Amino acid sequence: MSKTERVGVSLDKKLLSMFDMLIRKQGYSNRSEAIRDLIRNRLSQEELTSPTSQAIAGVFLVYDHHVTRLSQNLVDLQHYYLLQVIASTHVHLDHHNCLEVIILKGKVKEIEKLGNNIASLKGVKLSRINIMTTGEHLA
Amino acid sequence: MSKTERVGVSLDKKLLSMFDMLIRKQGYSNRSEAIRDLIRNRLSQEELTSPTSQAIAGVFLVYDHHVTRLSQNLVDLQHYYLLQVIASTHVHLDHHNCLEVIILKGKVKEIEKLGNNIASLKGVKLSRINIMTTGEHLA
Amino acid sequence: MSKTERVGVSLDKKLLSMFDMLIRKQGYSNRSEAIRDLIRNRLSQEELTSPTSQAIAGVFLVYDHHVTRLSQNLVDLQHYYLLQVIASTHVHLDHHNCLEVIILKGKVKEIEKLGNNIASLKGVKLSRINIMTTGEHLA
Amino acid sequence: MSKTERVGVSLDKKLLSMFDMLIRKQGYSNRSEAIRDLIRNRLSQEELTSPTSQAIAGVFLVYDHHVTRLSQNLVDLQHYYLLQVIASTHVHLDHHNCLEVIILKGKVKEIEKLGNNIASLKGVKLSRINIMTTGEHLA
């Protein structure tokens, strides 16, 4: 387990009391944890601006499962890109619509390209990609 | 199956040719489909601004599975909110870190509250919520 | 001038060294200032989720100044909403296009409504609204 | 003035009626204009993903004008980057806080770098950058 360091931060009293109020509402038990989360988020956000960063993503698709060929096209796309599909979950939304959540790993730019191409598939009504860093650097 | 209507749109030739270039790059086979997607996205975006809209969400958590009590706290939270958990997928990222993707249904405001509370759990390093409309109105 | 308080934060050494690298790249001279900025941003973001918060916004419009009535419609809209226009800057982009940046104060929800209505004005090609908190609570 | 072309789009009746309702609420007088705006936004968004695209931006700063050297540092930064400052507007928010909106032109990546560096200046409490395409390609 890695070592921790104690850092001192000067904060205006009013700013601090507003922050304390917010994190209590969110459920944090202490300030250190809340500040660590702000730092991790900032670092993660920074990492994702680099097109070659390794990332993990969830691709969300709402699609009409009556449209033939879509499943095949999805599989083809996943093979075309240099991405590693880890898992995929299928949810039945209503008589026409399915939600598919595909969890994959790969470079930021490959994931973004895949996202554009999936959106254009016939039968896909809505699509969204949620990219995150893998967290391995974020102790 | 619902009926379709043919709508005429006047577009500047230069704007049209730029749009054609973009959608070819994205993989669309025709303009109608690309324009339908723009419209669906706009409507979906609008629907999500209302706190009481029914939505579907993916909650992404990167967390340290060595931290005890986290799994129990996650389950408790899911019961506290008026949300219906549909599925959840667990991915082993490395020796310390796991990714958990929880797919759930509920009102926009309940989902957002849950998101804030999950971020604050001890052991959660990164969290993100991806909210989408259920697509049932989007033919 | 308000009082400051010294707060101690425990940070993993690796996380801390990554943060130090990032803030040096961004030009921060010390950690306290960087952490204060993260806190202020988080508080500001939270404040803007409330529709009745007082905010300051920049409305950006790219429009074709050959389209008559647009200036008049803009003025009408600004009077219709309960917003206080503080300043507006007009920039000549090219033969057809102007940029207008309108700085105004008002409630978040009023600003958002204005934004939607301005986007729909004939002649407006692009529009964007940048909302910020007024900063008065952020010491 | 450039030529327009009439394009036919097939739309599901239910989708169309929802879209009509939305654009009426937003104030559009006809569908063509609303669809043109969706297309322009999509193209603009695409253009901004390229780091070398020419863009126009509004840099928003809330800062404490009692902090000396800030104005000088701002001017230095503006000269350091290959950006062309077009105009800047100063607004007095309260006894301590000023808002400065700097409108500038330049490449997307230069604008983003400037944004990070401005955020780190001593005295700057909040900062945001609003980037837009210049609209010259968007007829």
Image (cartoon, coloured by chain):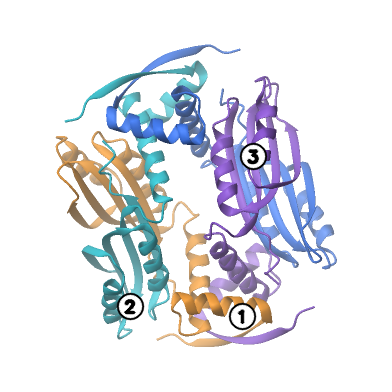
Chain colours: A cyan, B orange, C blue, D purple
* Residue plotted at (17% across, 47% down): B94
State yes or no: discs 1 and 3 in contact (Cβ < 8 Å).
no
Find residue A60 and report its horizontal and vertical position in percent: 34, 64
**Do the residues indicated by labels 1 and 3 lie within the same chain of the protein?**
no
User: What distance separates the C-alpha of mark 3 from that of mark 2?
Assistant: 56 Å
* Residue plotted at (49% across, 67% down): B41
Instruction: Tell which subunit mark 1 falls on.
Output: B
Q: Nearest to the eye among marks 2 and 1: give it.
A: 1
Q: Indicate the amino acid at tag 1.
A: Ser
Check disc 3: other Cα within 10 Å, few if <14, some if 14-19, many if 20+.
few
Residue C76's place in the image compared with B29, above or below, is: above
State yes or no: discs 3 and 2 in contact (Cβ < 8 Å).
no
Find residue C107 and report its horizontal and vertical position in percent: 63, 41
- Element type where label 1 sits in the image: helix
Residue sitting nearer the eye, D5 or B39: D5
Q: Which residue is mark 3?
A: D80
- Residue D114 is drawn in which quadrant? top right
Q: Indicate the amino acid at tag 2.
A: His
User: What distance separates the C-alpha of mark 1 from that of mark 3?
Assistant: 38 Å
* Residue plotted at (25% across, 42% down): B77
User: What distance separates the C-alpha of mark 2 from that of mark 1?
Assistant: 34 Å
Find residue A62 and report its horizontal and vertical position in percent: 35, 70
Q: Nearest to the eye among marks 3 and 2: give it.
A: 3
Find residue A21 and report its horizontal and vertical position in percent: 43, 26
User: In which quadrant is the C terminus of chain A drawn?
Assistant: top left
The disc placed on residue A96 is 2
